[in-house]
Each structure stands twice: as C-alpha cells, then as structure tokens.
Amino acid sequence: MPEVLLTEDCIRLISQFERLTGAGSRDCVIDDRNNRIIFVVNTGEMGLAIGKNGASIKKAMDVMGKKIEVVEYSNNPEQFLRNCFLPAQVTSIDFEGEDEEQIAHIEVRDEDRGIAIGKEGKNIFKAKKLAQRQHNIADVQLVSNESQ
C-alpha cells in the first residue's frame, strides 16, 4: 500500500468536506488545471458524500468554491479503477508489469469512451493520479476493443 502524503491544504479540505457531508475521506487531489477537488471517500460512504438529490456535494461545492468529484475507495485495485471511471462502464481491466511498474489497461464500452476520457482528458487524468496514489499503479491506459 503506497503512503499517501497529504499537504496542509488537503488535510484542511478533507476536514471541511467531512464536516459538510458526513462522509469520511482518505485522499484529496487539488486539480487546478480543471478547477476541481477530487476526494476519495471511504468504502460505502458515497451516498453520504453526495447526499439526497446531491445536496451534500452541492453544499460542499458552494462552500469550497470549486467543482468537487468523489470516487469511492476500494482496496481491490480493479474495483477502484472501475469506480474512477464511473459512470462509464468498464468492460475489462488487465494489469501488466510488477509493483511500481504496473500498468492497467482499461477497456470501456465504445459508447462510454468519451465519458472515460473526459473533456480535455480530465477523467483519464483523475484515474491515473488516484491509481498511482492509492494502489501504486504506474499508468492507466484506455485500450480500444476493436481487434487490430
């Protein structure tokens, strides 16, 4: 399990997020490029983080003044990656390499490819960053399912 180092800002944001939503968070990434904060919430606390009709997460966004995205943690790397790409549906995940050199090859349904990549690549960026921080996966690559 990689050791996640949290900056002072992240610790403050996690504390604020937990106070506002009631959901526990184990990691936070400040993504200035996409003007958002990504929280990794504890397993089973996604509903708390979002709140009824999105009320909790909307309140947190208003208070923090940035878009907030949440990913549910899983200690299973494959499930965690599936969570990173939601709502895109992952059809298969293959891991290649060992330890710090591990690469995840992700396949999504063709119609979900745009969602998986995200505007200007922001969703694939989120998956790469979180997979590295949470599971020491060196890279995440989207593969197409058409045979070459």
Image (cartoon, helix red, strand yellow):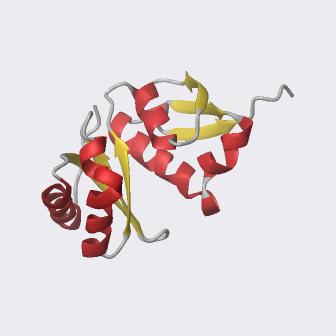
The N terminus is located in which quarter?
A: top left
In-front residue for pair 94/61: 61
Residue at 24%, 74% (x, y): give it: 63
Compared with 8, 74 (above or below) is above
The x, y position of residue 145, in whole percent, is: 75, 29
In-front residue for pair 103/80: 80
Residue at 54%, 24% (x, y): give it: 95
Tell me where residue 75 sits by quadrant: top left
Tell me where residue 60 sits by quadrant: bottom left
The x, y position of residue 83, in whole percent, is: 44, 37
Q: In this rendering, does residue 4 appear at all?
A: no
In this rendering, position of residue 62 left or right of residue 146: left
The C terminus is located in which quarter?
A: top right
Report the residue that reaches farthest toward the right.
148
Residue at 27%, 50% (x, y): give it: 49
The x, y position of residue 69, in whole percent, is: 39, 56
Compared with 63, 74 (above or below) is above
In this rendering, position of residue 14 left or right of residue 135: left
Tell me where residue 42 sits by quadrant: top left
In-front residue for pair 61/41: 61
